[in-house]
C-alpha cells in the first residue's frame, strides 16, 4: 500500500510517465468507465421490483441458461482446439506454419455477423460440413449446437493468443531434464508442461467464456432464435432495445456484466491461490 | 512522408472547400429508411435532385441511412439529425411524436395518411409449391414450416403477425380464444426467427430452411425475380385476404426547424406522390394510390382484399400495447410451449 504511494514521490526514470498515465486514465474513462456508468444510470432509474421483473422474465431466464450452457461447451472446445493450435504453431516448424499463425486471428478481423451467415450456410444439413453431422441426425445450424459453433469461432483466438507466448517462452531444458530423469512423455506433459501453461490456459479460457456470453452478431445469424430453445441473452437485450425499453435492456445487460466481473474476480483469486502456492 | 500526407489532406480539404463555394448549394438533407429500401431510394434520390436543380437552380445532397426502423427511431431520439423518415411502421413514427420530434398531426401532412405507397404480406414457396400453400390456413398445418423474422425486431414480421391475426379474427368471427389458438400454432410453425428481413431470406432461399417465407409482397416479388435467387424457381403466393401494410413518411419537425430545411424536406416527401415516382415505385413491386398509375399497372398485382389493422384492432398505439409490448399477446403466445 505505502510502497505503491512512494512511487509518486520518486520520479520514475523513464520519461513521459505523467503524460502517458493521464492519457491512459482519460482513455479508460471515456471508452470504458463512462459507458458503464451510463448503463448503471439507466438501471438506477428503475425500482427494485421493476428491475427484478426485467431480469427474471421467464424467457430471459431461459436465455441465461442457453447462453451459459453454450458458452461452457464452446469454451471447453475452444480450449482443447486452441491449445493444440498453439502447440503446433509454437513447437513445430513446418511449411505453412506462419500462415496458420496468421489465420488464427481471422475471427477478430471478420465482422461477426458475416461469420455467422457463413457458418450457418456451412452447417445446414445440405452444407459442406453440416452433411457429416446430418448422418448422425445432428442439426447444427438453427439449433443449439449452432450457437456453440458460432461462439467457438469467435472465441478461439483468445485461447491461442494467450497460450502461445507462454509455450514459446517455456524452455525445453525443463522438459529435457525431466526426460533425463526418466519421465515418460505423458508424464513430462502432465507434470512439467501443463502446470506451467495452466495460468495462460485459464486466462484464455475465461476471456473466451466472457466473450461468448456477450456474443451477438455471429450467434443470432445461426441460432434460429426460437423462444425458450435458442434465444441468447444478447438477443433479449436487443429485443428490449427495439421495444424502446432501455431500462430493461440495461438491467439484463447488468446481469451479464456482473456475471462476467464475478467470474473474472473468481479466476483471479483461484489463480493467485493456486499458483503462488506452487511457486513457493 | 508525414509532410506529404499532411499536404495531400490540406490540398484536398481546400479543393473541396472551393468547389462547395463555387456552386449554389442547399444544406444536405438526411433521409432515414428501413433496411430493404436501398434500391428504391437510390432510384428516387437522383430524380429529386435533378428536379430540385431545375426548380431552384441549387444543388442538393441527399444523405441516406438504412436500418430497421425501430433502430432508426432510437437514433433520432438520441440526437441523429434526420430530416425525413420513410419508414415501414407507423408505430416507429408515433414514438417520435411521443418524444416531441414529429408533429402529432403528421398523418394529415401528406395524402393517403402520409403513406405514398403500400404493400401487403405475401408468401414465397419452393419450386412447384410442393406443400400446396394457398392461404393462411395452410400455414398452421403440422407439416408446414415457416420462416419470418422476429416481430419484435422487424417491421415486416409485425405485419406478418397481424396478417395471421386479422385473417383468424375474421374466420372465427372475432372469437379471441380461437384466434389466439390459430396465431399460436402459426408462430410455433416458425423454424427460424431471424432478427431482420435479410437474415430470413438467407435462411429460406440460401440455406433451405422451412417451406414458406413470409414478408412484404414487394420483397417477395423482388426475391423471386432477383438475379441472386431466380435460379431457385421460387413461387409467389398472395393469399386472398391479407393485411394492409402502409409505408408512412414524415418530416422530422424538430430537426428541420433547427436546420432550416423544412421546405426541401417537405418537397422531397411530396415528390414521392408524383406520377413519375409512383410509376417508379411499381417497378419495385410496391402498390400505389395514384389513380392513373394504379390503372396502368393493375394487372401486375394479384387480387387481394386488404384489411386495415387500425379498422379492426384500434389505433396503432393500442395495437402496439396489446400485441407487441413486453408481455403482450405476442409474448404470451410465444411463451406457450
Image (cartoon, helix red, strand yellow):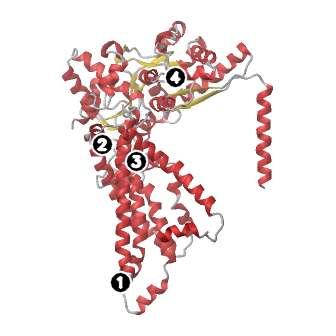
Q: Which mark is in front, 3 or 2?
A: 2
The Cα–Cα distance between marks 3 and 1, rounded to whole angstroms, is 39 Å
User: Is residue A114 something one can see in this rendering?
Assistant: no
The lab-note entry on whether marks 2 and 1 share a chain reads: yes
The structure residue drawn at horizontal position 42% and vertical position 92%, both measured from the top left corner, is A180
The Cα–Cα distance between marks 4 and 3, rounded to whole angstroms, is 30 Å
The Cα–Cα distance between marks 2 and 4, rounded to whole angstroms, is 34 Å
The structure residue drawn at horizontal position 49% and vertical position 65%, both measured from the top left corner, is A161
* Corner quadrant of residue A52: top left
The Cα–Cα distance between marks 2 and 1, rounded to whole angstroms, is 48 Å
State left or right for residue B53 relative to residue B153: right
Residue at which label 4 appears = B86
The lab-note entry on whether marks 4 and 1 share a chain reads: no
Which comes sooner in the sequence, label 2 or label 1? 2
Q: Determine whether the residue tagged by mark 4 lies in a helix, strand or loop.
A: strand
Residue at which label 2 appears = A55
Residue at which label 1 appears = A187
Chain letter of the residue carrying label 3: A
**Are the two marked residues, 3 and 2, in contact with CB atoms closer than 8 angstroms?**
no
The image position of residue B173, as x and y in percent, is 22, 14
Which comes sooner in the sequence, label 3 or label 2? 2
The Cα–Cα distance between marks 4 and 1, rounded to whole angstroms, is 68 Å
Q: On screen, A89 above or below B46?
A: below
State left or right for residue A273 relative to residue B183: right
**Are the two marked residues, 4 and 1, in contact with CB atoms closer than 8 angstroms?**
no
The lab-note entry on whether marks 4 and 3 share a chain reads: no
The Cα–Cα distance between marks 3 and 2, rounded to whole angstroms, is 21 Å
Amino acid at each position: 500500500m505505502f510502497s505503491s504511494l512512494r512511487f509518486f514521490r520518486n520520479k520514475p526514470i523513464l520519461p513521459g510517465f505523467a503524460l502517458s498515465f493521464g492519457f491512459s486514465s482519460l482513455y479508460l474513462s471515456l471508452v470504458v468507465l463512462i459507458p458503464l456508468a451510463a448503463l448503471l444510470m439507466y438501471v438506477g432509474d428503475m425500482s427494485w421490483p421493476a428491475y427484478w421483473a426485467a431480469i427474471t422474465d421467464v424467457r430471459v431466464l431461459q436465455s441465461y441458461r442457453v447462453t451459459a450452457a453454450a458458452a461452457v461447451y464452446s469454451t471447453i472446445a475452444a480450449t482443447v482446439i486452441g491449445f493444440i493450435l498453439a502447440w503446433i504453431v509454437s513447437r513445430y516448424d513446418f511449411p505453412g506454419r506462419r500462415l496458420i499463425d496468421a489465420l488464427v486471428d481471422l475471427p477478430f478481423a471478420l465482422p461477426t455477423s458475416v461469420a455467422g451467415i457463413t457458418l450457418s450456410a456451412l452447417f445446414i444439413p445440405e452444407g459442406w460440413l453440416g452433411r457429416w453431422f446430418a448422418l448422425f441426425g445432428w442439426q447444427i445450424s438453427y439449433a443449439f449446437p449452432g450457437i456453440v459453433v458460432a461462439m467457438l469461432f469467435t472465441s478461439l483466438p483468445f485461447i491461442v493468443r494467450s497460450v502461445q507466448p507462454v509455450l514459446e517462452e517455456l524452455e525445453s531444458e525443463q522438459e529435457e531434464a525431466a526426460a533425463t530423469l526418466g519421465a515418460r512423455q505423458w508424464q513430462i506433459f502432465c507434470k512439467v508442461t501443463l502446470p506451467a501453461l495452466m495460468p495462460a490456459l485459464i486466462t484464455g479460457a475465461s476471456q473466451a467464456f466472457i466473450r461468448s456470453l456477450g456474443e451477438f452478431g455471429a450467434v443470432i445469424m445461426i441460432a434460429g432464435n426460437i423462444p425458450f430453445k435458442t434465444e441468447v441473452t444478447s438477443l433479449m437485450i436487443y429485443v428490449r432495445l427495439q421495444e424502446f425499453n432501455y431500462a430493461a435492456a440495461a438491467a439484463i445487460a447488468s446481469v451479464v456484466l456482473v456475471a462476467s466481473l464475478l467470474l473474472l474476480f473468481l479466476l483471479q483469486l483461484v489463480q493467485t491461490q493456486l499458483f503462488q502456492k506452487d511457486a513457493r | 512522408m508525414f509532410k506529404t500526407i499532411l499536404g495531400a489532406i490540406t490540398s484536398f480539404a481546400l479543393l473541396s472547400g472551393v468547389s462547395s463555394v463555387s456552386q449554389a448549394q442547399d444544406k444536405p438533407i438526411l433521409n432515414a429508411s428501413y433496411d430493404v429500401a436501398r434500391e428504391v431510394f437510390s432510384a428516387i434520390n437522383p430524380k429529386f435532385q435533378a428536379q430540385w436543380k431545375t426548380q431552384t437552380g441549387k444543388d442538393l445532397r441527399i444523405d441516406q441511412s438504412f436500418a430497421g426502423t425501430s433502430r432508426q427511431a432510437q437514433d433520432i431520439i438520441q440526437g441523429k439529425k434526420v430530416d425525413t423518415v420513410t419508414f415501414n411502421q407507423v408505430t416507429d413514427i408515433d414514438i417520435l411524436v411521443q418524444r416531441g420530434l414529429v408533429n402529432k398531426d403528421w398523418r394529415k401532412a401528406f395524402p393517403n395518411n402520409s403513406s405514398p405507397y403500400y404493400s401487403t404480406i405475401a408468401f414465397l414457396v419452393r419450386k412447384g409449391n410442393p406443400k400446396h400453400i394457398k392461404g393462411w390456413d395452410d400455414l398452421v398445418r403440422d407439416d408446414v414450416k415457416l420462416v419470418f423474422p422476429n416481430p419484435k425486431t422487424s417491421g415486416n414480421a409485425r405485419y406478418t403477425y397481424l396478417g395471421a391475426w386479422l385473417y383468424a379474427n375474421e374466420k372465427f368471427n372475432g372469437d379471441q380464444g380461437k384466434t389466439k389458438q390459430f396465431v399460436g400454432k402459426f408462430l410455433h410453425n416458425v423454424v427460424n426467427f431471424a432478427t431482420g428481413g435479410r437474415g430470413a431470406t438467407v435462411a429460406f432461399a440460401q440455406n433451405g430452411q422451412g417451406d414458406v417465407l413470409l414478408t412484404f409482397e414487394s420483397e417477395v416479388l423482388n426475391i423471386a425475380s432477383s438475379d441472386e435467387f431466380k435460379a431457385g424457381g421460387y413461387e409467389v403466393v398472395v393469399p386472398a385476404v391479407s393485411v394492409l401494410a402502409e409505408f408512412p413518411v414524415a418530416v422530422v419537425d424538430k430537426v428541420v426547424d433547427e436546420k432550416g430545411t423544412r421546405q426541401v424536406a417537405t418537397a422531397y416527401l411530396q415528390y414521392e406522390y408524383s406520377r413519375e415516382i409512383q410509376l417508379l415505385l411499381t417497378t419495385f413491386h410496391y402498390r400505389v394510390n395514384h389513380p392513373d398509375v394504379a390503372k396502368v399497372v393493375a394487372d401486375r398485382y394479384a387480387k387481394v382484399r386488404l384489411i386495415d389493422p387500425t379498422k379492426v384492432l384500434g389505433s396503432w398505439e393500442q395495437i402496439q400495447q396489446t400485441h407487441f409490448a413486453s408481455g403482450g399477446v405476442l409474448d404470451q403466445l410465444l411463451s406457450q410451449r
